[in-house]
Amino acid sequence: MKALGPIPAGFAAIEGELAIDGHKASELVARAGETPLFVYSRRMLEAKFARLRAAMPDRLAIHFALKANPFAPVLEVMSNLVDGFDVASAGEMTMAFKAGVSPQKISFAGPGKRDAELMAAIHHGVTLNLESEGEAERALAIAKREGLTPRLAIRVNPDFDLKGSGMKMGGGAKPFGVDAERVPALARRIIEEGAEWHGLHIFAGSQALSADAIIETQGQTIDLAARLAGEIGAPLPHCNLGGGMGIPYFPGDEPVDVEAVGTALAARLADLPELLRDTHFNIELGRYLVGEAGVYLTRIVDRKVSHGEVFLVTDGGLHHQLAASGNFGTVVRRNYPVAIASRFDAPVEEEASIVGCLCTPMDKLADKAGFPRADVGDLVAIFCAGAYGASASPAMFLGHGPAHEMLV
């Protein structure tokens, strides 16, 4: 029997059934009209941010990486909490605007920005995190043609990565950012052209659970920013330290000691070199802020036994939960936190695999794990579904379409 990932704190049972912010899972499904359904908890979003804000130094701004969850009601909640939004497309930029976010609080990163996207960002006054010299030249040419002053920063490809991170974004050859040794010349070019120089974006990795690794990387990032500022020969207005903090998904995972990270970062920011004394610092986080606040609810439509193994077949699957199926950034498939929502507080009675409705063996939501006995009609809950779920999964695969979404 294979272990399941840890269910995040904050969920309870009402009359034996999973409850989300005091609402039974079956009640939420009835309200939505059908399954599958993503449910996001406003209370958990606010509580997670409050803990992070209390742990981080006062001078540090906190940004939300919109790609983690672009559901409009979630964005509206986040817009009242965070100091800024980080987007990766013109579409995400528009979503941020609709959530009431000021353009001056938005930064736009990502390789392969099209000219129309560069123009839109420049027209609105959004900060462009430039990913290459070529992108910089295109942005400068567009701004000159339009008679506008662009707000430009440089995304740096650092010489290091975040140890233990699930997704390494720095170190070695990367499609992201400008190699560190080429940054000073590009920054001087931007300044000489009369653009509004906004600073550096240094993102080394994501989904790390080790506080020590995050602390080390943030220290390296600050050291690199100071070295580059000296080589540029101009003040550094802003430095985006990236993200890095992950959430527990798998058996044995432990949450990040966010207080330890905040204490160490406060000490570093209190002892900056002269070149960085007036620099504004921020971190950008996505899944850490929203991941644990989401639950994916799907209904069992068939129970079958094959060669002695129990399979619970649901009306959901990898087309909504690519990550939980093990097909989004993992090498070895491990079980997410999963439960029978209809019998949330019942003991384990059998070993079963939970599979989706797609005709592919990749569509597996739980592999040979222990559950209470479940039957047709019961609800299954996939936890840690608040990030990289609905929008990061192939919803149109095999024509099944998107899931419902709800904020409670």
Image (cartoon, rainbow, N blue to C red):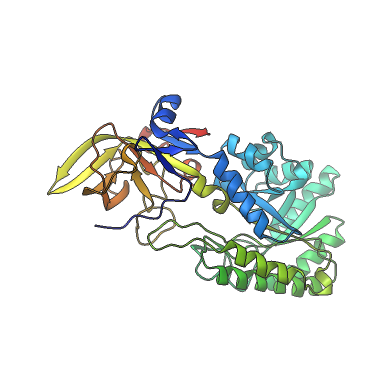
Q: Please, is residue 208 above or below residue 292 in the view?
A: below
Picture quadrant where residue 235 is located: bottom right
Image point (29%, 44%), residue name? 346
Q: Between residues 364 and 234, which one lies in front from this camera angle?
A: 364
Q: Please, is residue 383 above or below residue 97 in the view?
A: below
Picture quadrant where residue 148 is located: top right
Which residue is at the far left?
307
Image point (51%, 33%), residue name? 406
Count of all numbered marks drawn on residues in the image: 0
Percent coordinates x, y for residue 246 in the rendering: 52, 58
Percent coordinates x, y for residue 241 in the rendering: 67, 63
Q: Is residue 197 left or right of residue 50?
A: right
Q: Between residues 56 and 406, which one lies in front from this camera angle?
A: 56
Which residue is at the far front?
15
Q: Is residue 19 left or right of residue 3?
A: right
Image point (74%, 47%), residue name? 105
The answer to whether residue 104 of the structure is visible from this angle is yes
